[in-house]
Amino acid sequence: MTLILEVVDEGTLIKFTHVDVPEGAYESVKEGWYTYYWDPLRALLEKY
């Protein structure tokens, strides 16, 4: 996995790469990242 934080005009861009996702699991893993990580992180950061 790689995580890159990049300064942009609007704030910070988070670039995350998840490698070695098993074949056939991409959609499930992608959905899980939004459900369990990205959406909660967005909600938390929007409070500040």
Image: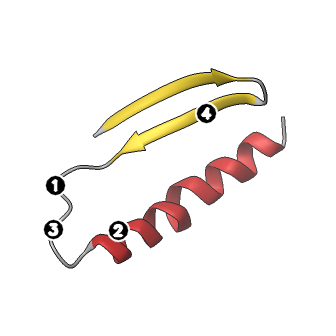
Asked whether disc 3 touches disc 1, contact meaning CB atoms under 8 Å apart, the reply is yes
According to the picture, the residue beneath numbered tag 1 turns out to be 20
Disc 2 versus disc 4: nearer the observer: 4
Asked whether disc 2 touches disc 4, contact meaning CB atoms under 8 Å apart, the reply is no
Going 78% across and 30% down the picture, which residue do you hit?
Answer: 10
Q: Which residue occupies the foreground of this view, 8 or 25?
A: 8
Going 40% across and 33% down the picture, which residue do you hit?
Answer: 3
Q: In which quarter of the image is residue 38?
A: bottom right
Q: Quadrant of residue 11?
A: top right
* Residue type at numbered disc 4: Leu
- The CA distance from mark 3 to mark 1 is 6 Å
* Residue type at numbered disc 2: Val
Single out the residue that lies furthest toward the top: 7
Q: How many labels does the image show?
A: 4
* Residue type at numbered disc 3: Pro
Q: Is residue 41 left or right of residue 9?
A: left
Going 52% across and 26% down the picture, which residue do you hit?
Answer: 5
Q: Which residue occupies the foreground of this view, 44 or 23?
A: 23
According to the picture, the residue beneath numbered tag 4 turns out to be 13
- The CA distance from mark 2 to mark 3 is 9 Å
Which label's residue is closer to the chain start, 2 or 1? 1
According to the picture, the residue beneath numbered tag 2 turns out to be 29
- The CA distance from mark 2 to mark 1 is 11 Å
Mark seen at residue 22: 3
